Amino acid sequence: MQVVGQVKPFVTFTGVAKTYDGRQNVVQNLDLEIGRGEFVSLLGPSGSGKTTTLMMLAGFETPTEGEIALDGKRLNDLPPHKRNIGMVFQNYALFPHLTIAENVAFPLSVRGVPKAEQKTRVARALAMVELPQVANRRPGQLSGGQQQRVALARALVFEPSLVLMDEPLGALDKRLRETMQYEIKRLHHELGLTVVYVTHDQGEALTMSDRVAVFFDGRIQQIAAPDVLYEDPQNAFVANFIGENNGIAGTVRHVSDDWAVMEVGGVAISGKTGRDLAPGAPAVLALRPERAFLLPPPGAELNRLPGTVADVTYCGDHRRLLVRLAAGGDFVLKAPNTDGHVLPPAGTAVEVGWRPADCKILTPPPVA
């Protein structure tokens, strides 16, 4: 089970599984703890189990096995409207025939909150998302970004103990998406919210989260702070899914507690040891493109592989080089776009290098 320090967890999944057909589990053996005030993102490809996990927490799906609890209270048999959980969806789910104020007030009205108190709370919620001026408009009169802010206000107006967000920014353009990311993080900090956030956008998860749970095949492959996921992936799936990775294939030659050696086209490559490595078994490299460089100096204790520059792409603050390795396969590295930094053109024979401490040697990812 994933443990949040020594503090009593606020949300817990214990041995949770979910199947729709009685044969295949879309979520399996899920143990997860989330602390009060944490922002945790559930990240993974389509069909990995992240949205089903969120829907079970919200009460729209029921676990086949295991238990879900909120602040120590079992949720399995509790209907959604009794869980005190706010929900924000990708499609906003606003009522088009109601004003913005009436939309935001809806969770209060179904809870029997007096009209006078509703008015006060709605005004406060719209002020939180910086939209007090739209109270009397209808959803169709607002932009997509404004509608998502209203949906956020509606989720917060009844002061829920937990806020769930299911791909809430997926329908927005890049600029609005980035603006809303900062808006959600601001409210998270200012209000001390506990947020569980589903996304397939790795950049969004890394930018916003205290921790990220990476899902694949109904299981959490790794849950950690964003920098730990990026710098120290525990398996090849996480290495390939989070950011760009040079996943070069080879064969394990030696394994110790901390270091391993793999062979790539007759060249020995050293790196930090991953799990379940065995001499003679296949392995893949986990190396970020920005940690590699061209033409490493002679004599330095570096990993080196020969190849030929296949392409150089201008990317603004850096250039992306694609090197075709002599051993087979492609290698990507990123070079800062600085004055005087001249890069070899396509067709040039080069050598790429990197420090052993900057890479890990891992078992290959499972075949989907």
Image (cartoon, rainbow, N blue to C red):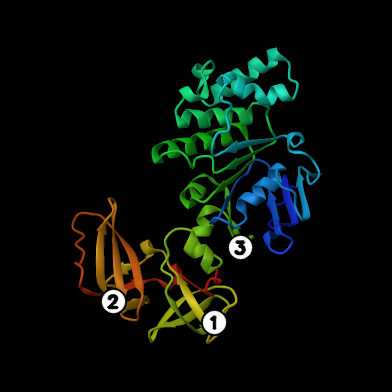
State the image quarter where residue 174 is shown: top left
Give the amino acid type for the residue marked by disc 1 in the picture: Val
Residue 148, percent from left and from top: 52, 32
Badge 3 vs badge 2, beta-carbon distance below 8 Å: no
**Of 93 and 357, which appears nearest the observer?**
93
For residue 179, the mark is none
Give the amino acid type for the residue marked by disc 3 in the picture: Asp
Q: 267 left or right of 282?
A: left
> Which of pointers 1 and 3 lies earlier in the amino acid sequence?
3
Q: Residues within 10 Å of mark 3 (few under 14, many from 20)?
A: some
Badge 1 vs badge 2, beta-carbon distance below 8 Å: no
Could you tell me which secondary element the residue under label 3 belongs to?
loop
**Of 180 and 263, which appears nearest the observer?**
180
Placement of the N terminus among the 4 image quadrants: bottom right
The residue tagged 1 is: 255
Calculate the distance from the C-alpha at mark 1 to the C-alpha at mark 2: 27 Å
For residue 217, the mark is 3
Is the residue 356 above or below the residue 62 in the image? Answer: below
The number of numbered discs placed on residues in the rendered structure image is 3
Residue 178, percent from left and from top: 43, 39
Calculate the distance from the C-alpha at mark 3 to the C-alpha at mark 2: 36 Å
